Amino acid sequence: MRLIRPLAAAALAASLLASPALADRPRDQDRAFRALRDGRALPLPRVEQRVIPYMGGADYLGPEFNGSTYRLKFVRDGRVIWVDVDAATGRIVGKSGD
């Protein structure tokens, strides 16, 4: 009986830790896919096509998505530049770090 309780507790703890529904928050790409499917966001490649030429040769490092905006990360001369883009319209709404 002494051994059963600790084993049962360990099994319960392992099942809770292994459950993706309880352990993981939605990823950026999952949120972006749902927003795209629901018509609340443009496809990322379309946004990138609009913004990257505007950045004048800065190296593009990648996107983040927060539900209503894409945040594109660039680097130029060792400085990080964030460009916030309205996901629904593709319009640049903010820029920092330049």
Image (spheres, grey):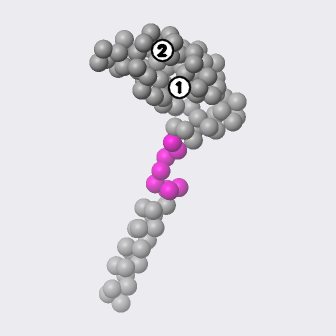
Instruction: Residue 18 in the image: state x and y as whole percent.
Output: 45, 62
Packing grade of label 1 (10 A; few <14, some 14-19, many >=20) is: many
Q: Which of marks 1 and 2 is nearer the N terminus?
A: 1
What type is the residue that disc 2 sits on?
Gly
- The C terminus - image quarter: top left
Q: In this view, does 68 lie above or below 91?
A: below
- State which quadrant residue 82 falls in: top left
Q: How far apart are marks 1 and 2 (CA)?
A: 11 Å
Under circle 2, the secondary element is strand
Q: Which residue is drawn at 50% across and 16% down?
A: 52
Instruction: Residue 84 in the image: state x and y as whole percent.
Output: 49, 19
Closer to the camera, 8 or 48?
48
Residue 24 falls within the magenta-colored stretch: yes
Residue designated by label 2: 94
Closer to the camera, 46 or 21?
46
Q: Is residue 80 above or below residue 19?
A: above
- The N terminus - image quarter: bottom left
Q: What are the residue bounds of the magenta stretch? A: 20-27
- State which quadrant residue 36 falls in: top right
What type is the residue that disc 1 sits on?
Tyr
Asked whether, in this view, residue 88 is left or right of residue 84, the answer is right
**What is the number of the mark on residue 70?**
1
